[in-house]
Image (cartoon, helix red, strand yellow):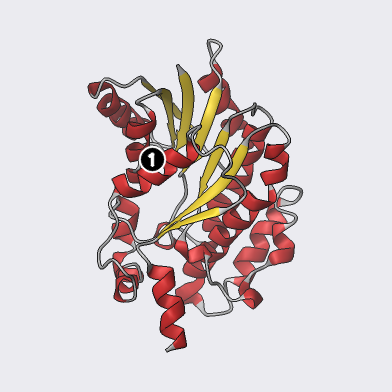
Amino acid sequence: MQTAVITGGAGGMGLATAKILGRDHRVVLADLGRERIDAAVEELKALGLSASGFVSDITDRRSVEAMLDAAEAGGHHVRALVHTAGISPQMGTADRVARINGTGTVNVTQAYLARVEEGDALVNVASVAGHGLPKPLVPSRAFRVAESDPAAFERAIVSRSRVLGKKLHSGLAYSMSKTFVIWYSKQQAGAFGARGARILSVSPGSFDTAMGRLESDHGAADLLKVSAIKRFGKPEEIAAVLAFAASEAPGYLTGTDILVDGGTRAGQVFAKRR
């Protein structure tokens, strides 16, 4: 049986994705909290799925390597990795957002790239917030040093996120970090393709998860005013896209972003044109 690793696997999107990938994969859930991981693993096992868990900090490259080593123990190979781990604006300061969402994605991507084989896939979770950020607000030059100088990369995001005031500090850092995830997933497509593997990002809109509910009163619910579908998405709906993107079926799908936002971005764009 093939192996799939899901970071943030104890969370709403991660666990929902594991329930789908677990139908034909051995799933390894990675998260920060042992209790949450154990509860999620037990839930999967109760469904008859093969699951295990590993405590991992994506901001620490060595921890990510240890996670993949554990997933490969016993001769297994990680055919798919779905990277859902991350935090929203209400969950941390701008520097923490930059480190977890930005540098964390670099760590996961580079650690997995070193191991990928023909037919493997990495799916990074971005966000609708990563679409449409005005270019002057995007620290594009800093994106290019995210691998070589993560501290400078993080400082650039934090510095740029101060331009609209303290109240929007973390929110703007979040948008920048997710803009980076989209950019970086595209930028790494050639490196993955050279090894016969794929990488892409998926950008959720407002979803009914613990993280999504946390942001409900801080802009997430307001997005429904312009969206085509006037409700929060269900975890199972984004999981279906994540699991498909990570499966072997879309073998020509790479170097792109899939926007799953209930028509929110379309509503924003066309509202401006009226």
Q: Is residue 35 above or below residue 261?
A: above
User: Mark 1 is on which residue type?
Assistant: Gly
Instruction: Spot the residue most to the bottom.
Output: 274
Q: Is residue 247 visible?
A: yes
Q: Is residue 76 left or right of residue 143?
A: left
Q: Is residue 88 left or right of residue 144?
A: left
Residue marked by disc 1: 14
Q: Position of residue 233 (x, y in %)?
A: 30, 56
Disc 1 residue crowd, few under 14, some 14–19, many 20+, Cα 10 Å: many
The quarter of the image holding the C terminus is bottom left
Q: Is residue 60 visible?
A: no
The secondary structure type at the circle numbered 1 is helix
What residue appears at the point 43 percent right and 71 percent down from the top-left corner? 266
Q: How many marks?
A: 1
Q: Is residue 158 above or below residue 150?
A: below
Instruction: Using the image as rendered, state which of residue 185 and residue 212 is in the foreground.
Output: 185
Instruction: Spot the residue most to the left.
Output: 46
Instruction: Using the image as rendered, state which of residue 42 and residue 57 is in the foreground.
Output: 42
Q: Position of residue 203 (x, y in %)?
A: 47, 56
What residue appears at the point 30 percent right and 51 percent down from the top-left corner? 209
Tell me the quarter of the picture where residue 222 sits: bottom left
What residue appears at the point 64 percent right and 29 percent down from the top-left corner? 116
Q: Position of residue 139 (x, y in %)?
A: 67, 67
The quarter of the image holding the N terminus is top left
What residue appears at the point 60 percent right and 65 percent down from the top-left corner? 158
Tell me the quarter of the picture where residue 35 sits: top left
Q: Is residue 250 above or below residue 102?
A: above
